[in-house]
Amino acid sequence: GNGVQTIGVSVFSGCTALADIEIGSSVQTIGASAFRDCKGLVSIDIAANVQEINNYAFQNCTSLASIDIPSNVQTIGEGAFLGCTALTTVTLNEGLKTIKGRAFYACPIVALSIPNSVITIETYYEKYADDVYQGAFENCKKLTNIVIGNGLTNISRDTFAHCTALKSVEIGDSVVTIGEAAFSECIALVDVEIGNGVQTIGVSVFSGCTAL
């Protein structure tokens, strides 16, 4: 209904028969794991007033093929679309500011445009026996081209690592630092346009990019 402002933590988690979601205009926050493991979900209509999609909100929604993130959404949480193995089309609109670690990890997104409003893309980190890093778009193995707008200053570690179909990258002039292994093992990468603002290219940024 139109009075709901927050969809709480894990509210619809595991509702495997849920096929369509229309999120009302009053909703501002989609809580952590709110629709996690909704494996039958094919369609989400997110109203314009949503400002935050929290961690793991749509994790493992394995039937979801496309998502349009409205311009009022400022933050996409950690692992928000992790495990969405059918997600080929993602539209990020001006207004988005932060994409957290492994938000779209291993999603089969085909093309990606990062709007100028995005200022932070984070990398997931967890300390095991060996440190684990997972970039926001790491292992997106269908991704063929990326355009990064003029808001981001740092491409963090492993952000686009192991995107093995990636052919072209255009990096905006706002980017100052490209972090360690950011494009490592992108074996199909042949065209990289680095903006005029880049001052630091980290260790192993293009390691394993054998087509360059």
Image: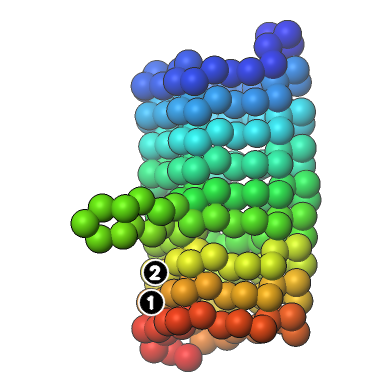
Q: Residue at x 45, y 66 (%)?
A: 158
Residue highlighted by disc 1: 185
Give the amino acid at mark 2: His
Give the amino acid at mark 1: Glu
Q: Is residue 184 above or below residue 56?
A: below
Q: Is residue 128 above or below residue 84?
A: below
Q: Position of residue 57 (x, y in %)?
A: 50, 32
Q: Tell me: 11 left or right of 47.
A: left
Q: How many dots with numbers?
A: 2
Q: Residue at x 71, y 29 (%)?
A: 50
Badge 1 crowding class, 10 Å Cα cut-off, few under 14, some 14 to 19, many 20 or more, is: many
Which residue is at the front of the view, 150 or 14?
150
Q: Residue at x 50, y 43 (%)?
A: 78
Q: Quadrant of residue 20?
A: top right
Q: CA distance from mark 1 to mark 2?
A: 5 Å
Dot 1 or dot 2: first in sequence order is: 2
Q: Quadrant of residue 117?
A: bottom right
Q: Position of residue 73 (x, y in %)?
A: 71, 38
Q: Residue at x 41, y 21 (%)?
A: 13
Which residue is at the front of the view, 207 or 60?
207
Q: Position of residue 39 (x, y in %)?
A: 38, 30
Q: Position of residue 66 (x, y in %)?
A: 56, 43
SS class, disc 2: loop
Q: Residue furthest left?
A: 129
Q: Which mark is residue 162?
A: 2
Image quarter where the N terminus lies is top right
SS class, disc 1: loop
User: Would you say residue 158 is visible in this rendering?
Assistant: yes
Q: Kindly check if marks 1 and 2 are in contact, taking CB atoms under 8 A apart as contact.
A: yes
Q: Is residue 100 above or below residue 7?
A: below
Q: Is residue 31 above or below residue 203?
A: above
